[in-house]
């Protein structure tokens, strides 16, 4: 083949590629939706400064017409550097009296962040100061709808914590057997416990036993505070398993709540990062007397009984937990449901199939509101539905919600919150505001697709390998943070074009009697909030277009 023919072939292939990518896109004029108007506010002291605990809650609040107020960034934690607790209390002292509702993280205000609560950094005096502060504020501002949440520390030893990490397996086994021996009073478990006990150095064993003993004591005080001050109290169980010291503490706090008579004001849930979003949604439902009905559709019957990684219970039990938390309700009648929660948990035993794709695409084509939770047990994209849905050009812009980040708990919490708030707003707002509402909801979904799917599943593992090959540490980037950010930015720029032109922009995301509305552009701003690659800070700015409905001729 001579050079001219080769160049011509390359040009033809490029034309074919770009036609496939861009061809068939609708012709529109710009549509600039106004953000949904806020009509109330809520103050949030987050679990820590990471985007899922701060920015995501603010964006869900904006969707729900709630202005979520968070502390100035400079007062919050930054990875291993804890928050400025003294200045946080001062900020709270000024801001709280002006609010109708507040969500307070005990872990941030006692320890300085979720991360340092596992050490822990907070002292008994810090706990006493927090309890006294909340009690005082409650008495002076009884009008505030106040919720406090705290997280039982996980027993997953940090890779950097030497020599503790050398005994990771031993500690996990010790924690499991200790809970099982106490639960079942079984001599076999007791014998195994004594055997593993002898293999762990006393100082490490004492350190972790004290961590859970102190946490148990603080939980008991929180229950008493909630009972005395009529607060809502949430205890989260972070990255747990069916048995272990965290599970043991959860069972203890359940008994404390029952004894104190907290009733519906006392909540225990699996998870941590999603708790603020769930509390926001619970407040929205209470504020507007809204209780949507949810029908659960599994990608296959196998999913309901699965126990996903970092979870202490089955998928079905997790769904019931989260639905009860926000005061939604389950229904067995799909026809009467306000939205359908479609849950896929992929693993070696449950890979994506054409039947699953057909089930989901049929639901979307029917016009039903569908919240998709798409998870993988092994954290690989080939176990997910999304890649197959994109290949089949199933219109994901019609989803009422999407989530699929690292655990079942936080994914369920995010998707249920988004779908509940979106459907709730459809009940509240006039139809003239629907295009703007749908556009705002789609912007949140786009962000989740780029973060949960594109970054976490397609890129994260490859980036980890690349950084290690270059001699960089993914959990401690230091001066190499800029290099990682540049690499991430380039990858997500390519992904946004594939999402937009391959699926999201090809069909209308909402249609009124007279117009069709389309996603026409996605701008992103991405960075690493901390000097590690575990999570990204992602802001999307979507552009939209509209076109008139084609008139039907008779």
Image (cartoon, helix red, strand yellow):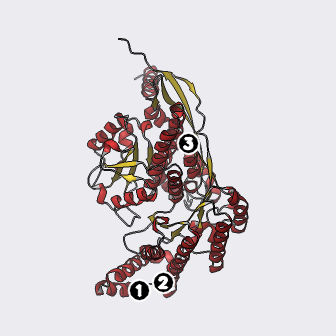
| Residue drawn at (42%, 53%) of the image | 328
Find residue 165 and report its horizontal and vertical position in percent. 49, 74
Image marks 1 and 2: residues in contact by CB distance under 8 Å: yes
Return the residue at label 3. 490
- Which quarter shows the N terminus? top left
Q: Nearer the viewer, residue 368 or 540?
A: 368
**Mark earlier in primary sequence (1, 2):** 1
Measure the alpha-carbon separation of dots 1 and 2: 8 Å
Return the residue at label 1. 197
| Residue drawn at (31%, 44%) of the image | 334
Find residue 32 and report its horizontal and vertical position in percent. 59, 30
Return the residue at label 2. 205
- Within the image, what quadrant is residue 368 found in? top left
Find residue 411 and report its horizontal and vertical position in percent. 44, 54
**Mark earlier in primary sequence (3, 1):** 1
| Residue 163 seen in the figure | no
Residue 496, numbered label: none
Q: Tell me: residue 353, above or below residue 7.
A: below
| Residue 425 seen in the figure | yes
Q: Is residue 474 left or right of residue 549?
A: right
Badge 1 density bin: few <14, some 14–19, many ≥20, Cα 10 Å: some
Q: Nearer the viewer, residue 152 or 484?
A: 152
Image marks 2 and 3: residues in contact by CB distance under 8 Å: no
Q: Nearer the viewer, residue 245 or 160?
A: 245
């Amino acid at each position: 083949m001579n050079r001219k023919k080769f160049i011509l072939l390359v040009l033809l292939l490029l034309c074919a590629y770009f036609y496939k990518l861009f061809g068939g896109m609708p012709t529109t004029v710009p549509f600039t939706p106004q953000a949904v108007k806020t009509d109330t506010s809520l103050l949030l002291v987050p679990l820590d400064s990471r985007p899922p605990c701060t920015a995501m809650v603010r964006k869900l609040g904006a969707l729900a017409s709630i202005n979520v107020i968070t502390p100035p960034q400079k007062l919050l934690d930054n990875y291993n550097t804890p928050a400025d607790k003294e200045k946080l209390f001062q900020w709270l002292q000024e801001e709280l009296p002006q609010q109708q509702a507040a969500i307070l993280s005990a872990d941030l205000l006692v320890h300085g962040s979720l991360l340092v609560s596992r050490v822990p950094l907070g002292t008994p005096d810090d706990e006493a100061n927090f309890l006294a502060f909340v009690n005082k504020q409650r008495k002076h501002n009884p009008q505030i709808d106040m919720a406090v949440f705290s997280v039982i520390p996980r027993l997953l030893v940090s890779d950097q914590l030497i020599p503790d990490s050398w005994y990771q397996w031993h500690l996990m086994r010790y924690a499991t057997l200790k809970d099982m021996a106490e639960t079942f009073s079984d001599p076999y478990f007791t014998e195994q416990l004594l055997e593993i006990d002898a293999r762990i150095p006393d100082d490490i064993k004492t350190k972790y036993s004290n961590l859970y003993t102190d946490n148990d004591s603080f939980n008991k005080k929180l229950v008493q505070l909630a009972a005395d001050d009529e607060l809502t109290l949430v205890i989260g169980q972070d990255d747990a398993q069916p048995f272990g010291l965290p599970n043991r503490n959860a069972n203890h706090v359940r008994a404390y709540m029952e004894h104190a008579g907290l009733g519906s004001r006392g909540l225990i849930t699996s998870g941590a990062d999603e708790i603020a979003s769930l509390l926001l949604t619970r407040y929205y439902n209470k504020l507007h007397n809204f209780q949507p009905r949810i029908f659960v559709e599994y990608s296959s019957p196998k999913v309901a009984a699965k126990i996903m990684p970092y979870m202490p219970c089955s998928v079905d039990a997790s769904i019931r937990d989260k639905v009860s938390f926000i005061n939604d309700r389950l229904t067995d009648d799909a026809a009467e449901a306000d939205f359908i929660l479609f849950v896929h948990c992929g693993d070696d035993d449950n890979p994506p199939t054409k039947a699953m794709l057909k089930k989901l695409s049929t639901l979307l084509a029917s016009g039903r509101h569908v919240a998709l939770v798409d998870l993988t047990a092994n954290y690989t994209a080939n176990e997910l539905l999304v890649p197959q849905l994109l290949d089949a050009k199933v219109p994901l812009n019609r989803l009422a919600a999407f989530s699929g980040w690292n655990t079942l708990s936080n994914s369920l919490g995010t998707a249920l919150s988004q779908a509940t708030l979106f459907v709730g707003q459809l009940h509240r707002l006039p139809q003239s505001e629907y295009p703007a509402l749908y556009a705002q909801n789609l912007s949140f979904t786009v962000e989740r697709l780029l973060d949960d799917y594109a970054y976490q599943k397609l890129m994260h593992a490859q980036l980890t390998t690349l950084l290690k090959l270059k001699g960089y540490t993914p959990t401690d980037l230091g001066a190499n943070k800029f290099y990682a950010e540049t690499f991430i930015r380039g990858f997500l720029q390519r992904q946004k074009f594939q999402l937009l032109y391959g699926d999201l922009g090809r069909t209308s995301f909402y249609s009124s009697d007279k117009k069709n509305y389309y996603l026409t552009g996605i701008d992103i701003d991405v960075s690493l909030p901390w000097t590690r690659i575990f999570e990204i800070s992602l802001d999307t700015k979507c552009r939209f277009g509209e076109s008139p409905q084609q008139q039907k001729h008779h």
